Amino acid sequence: MTAPSPSVPLLSARGLRFARNDEPVFGPLDFEVDAGEALLIRGDNGAGKTTLLRVLAGLLRPEDGRIEIDGHATVTPERTRALAYLGHLPALKADLGALENLEFLCGLHGRREGQSAEAAMRIVGLDGYQDALARQLSAGQKKRLSLARMWLSPAPVWLLDEPYANLDLDGIELVNRMVQAHLREGGAALVTTHGAYAAPPVRTRELLLRRAA
Ligand SMILES: Nc1ncnc2c1ncn2[C@@H]1O[C@H](COP(=O)(O)OP(=O)(O)OP(=O)(O)O)[C@@H](O)[C@H]1O
């Protein structure tokens, strides 16, 4: 991962707006996040936090606005390479083993330099579960496996939708340590939260979403 110039935000959005059936969900929004920073996206249930991350990830098309990575306007395939998305549902193949899932996903999205799937499993506390089928893992273990996938991703920007959900205290600290390490290496993280949960102890900006009137 190469750190971008400090004068250019790693990710920025200008005039970003999303609507469903002509009903506004959020925006227009302007925000940015630098390498080494987290953007905490706060808001009540239904405020549009998940929708915003899905728009950034290229899974939904915005009504309007511009998204830039490292100062360049992006179209979706380019953006997909720069972003790693951790959604509510674990993006795992239920009938593959835990390690097989990671290898499969690395084959699809690439791999962070110098990292192995085995090491990522150790980092997230899943040593000994390499051969367990994904469908046999608990919700928290699935979340940990998804975190291992994030760790292995070469993408500089992490989109984390409620990353603390389903995790025990140790898991919450794990998320914080992983975000800290990712930011130290020049990455950035966008993290949704209702505000009641923990937040990573890193340089943080905030974006508050309100339900569209
Ligand atoms: N697939 C969908 N089809 C139609 N409406 C949707 C869909 N997904 C979300 N919505 C609506 O879009 C709005 C924003 O939802 P979103 O999931 O982005 O909110 P959120 O801030 O992430 O909420 P929460 O904190 O409850 O997870 C809500 O009014 C919701 O009902």
Image (tube, rainbow, N blue to C red):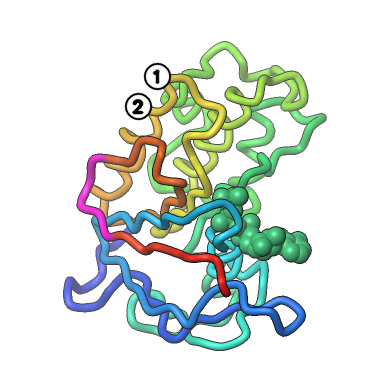
Q: Which residues are magenta?
A: 201-205
Image quarter in which the C terminus is found = bottom right
Say whether residue 177 is left or right of residue 101. Answer: left
Is residue 180 left or right of 112 when viewed as pictured? left
Query: Are there few (<14), some (14-19), or many (20+) residues within 10 Å of tag 1?
Result: few
Q: Residue at x 31, y 60 (%)?
A: 206
The question of residue 76 being in magenta is answered with no
The residue sitting at the top extreme is: 128
What separation in Å lies between label 1 and label 2 (alpha carbons)? 5 Å
Q: Amino acid at mark 2?
A: Glu
Note whether ligand 1 is within 8 Å of mark 1: no
Residue 89 percent across, percent down from the top left: 68, 42
| Residue drawn at point x = 68 percent, y = 32 percent | 100
The residue carrying pointer 2 sits among few (fewer than 14), some (14 to 19) or many (20 or more) residues within 10 Å by Cα, namely some
In this view, 190 is above or below 133: below
Tell me whether circle 1 and circle 2 mark residues in contact (CB < 8 Å): yes
